[in-house]
Image: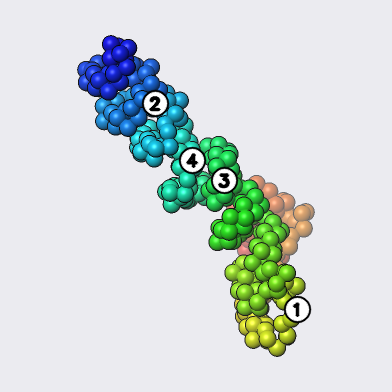
Amino acid sequence: MYYIDTKDYTKALEELSNMPDEGKKNKIMLRYASLFINSITKLTIESLMSNFQGIMVEELIPALMSVGNQYRLFANTFVRESALKHNSKLIYDLYIFFLAQSGDIVNDELSEFLEKEEAMHRQGEPLDIDREFALNVFKFFGKRSAATRAYSMLELYEEAVKTAISAGELKLAKEYASEPKDEKLRKKLWQQIAGTVLNPKEGAETQTSFALVSESQGNLVLNDVLHLVSPKIKLKTFRDDILNQVKIYDSKIESFRGRIAEYNESARGIGEQYKLIHSSAVRLPPDKCCDCCEKLLVGPGTFLTFPCLHGFHLVLTCDDVLGMSG
């Protein structure tokens, strides 16, 4: 192109954007995209959004990677729209790469996006991003909160809780500590949180200790945190806390007792039904014969038995049976 040779990139982009042949236009843009983006970044991104609707955005990724910090967020608008349009994992990966590289100004946007990805993961839906790539990007740029979410989507809950604690994201740490299916692992993770929240050097306040036990929803018990309570606090100081905790335990015990009573009642009902069936059943020896025809009672045909242990083949008439008694 003449204007490219003369380094009049603005005019070259204008001519290219107005080219009627879409296929040829897109092919030329892909060839010179890096040159345009490095020279007239904003104009190129604007033109890509409005004049190159059918271009293969994935093939633009090497050129887009060269966008400088000044226009990185602006370029990411084009990347986000392209990812939504084409549903491409590669483009989504570029999107989160730009967000991670753009500093704290886009933390909310990144968090919102990752929350949606987490919801999709919990529902078993395919994710828009590559989780391993995302984790490496967040670790590289020091995005600890984002890395925590990536660990969670990889179901690496120990790393997720550890990273969340180091980032001061205790809410996230508590959320991920309750995620594992393994009961022992959940307890271990909550104990790590307790060791952070209840500073053993300073001695934890009793209200904080009991609140954490309650918040763990059964993953911690009182004995797990008592050693973290300040030894300077006298027993009477947290007497009310202990009494409240005992009331909670009493309530749970009563609930369990109620369930046990229901199970016992169900067991008794089953036992009564079994006795009824057992008492009304008739046990026949394998060589029991029909009391009328004297052939084996058990066979291919239907037969009747009575509490008196008389048995008859159903094919026999009433006269046959009555005749036996006459």
Q: Are marks 1 and 4 in contact (CB under 8 Å)?
A: no
- Dot 4 or dot 2, earlier in sequence: 2
Mark closer to the observer (1, 2): 2
- Secondary element under disc 3, as helix, strand or loop, is loop
- Dot 4 or dot 3, earlier in sequence: 4
Q: Residue at x 68, y 86 (%)?
A: 237
Q: Work out whether residue 12 can be spotted.
A: yes
For badge 3, the amino acid type reads Gly
The residue beneath circle 2 is 38
Q: Nearer the viewer, residue 131 or 80?
A: 80
Q: Nearer the viewer, residue 44 or 177?
A: 44
Q: Quadrant for the C terminus, please.
A: bottom right
Q: Residue at x 44, y 28 (%)?
A: 66
- Dot 3 or dot 1, earlier in sequence: 3
Q: Are marks 4 and 2 in contact (CB under 8 Å)?
A: no
The residue beneath circle 3 is 142
Q: Work out whether residue 266 can be spotted.
A: no
Residue 151 against residue 281 in the figure, above or below: above
- Dot 1 or dot 2, earlier in sequence: 2
Residue 197 on image: x %, y %: 64, 67
Please tell me in which quadrant of the rendered image residue 182 appears: bottom right
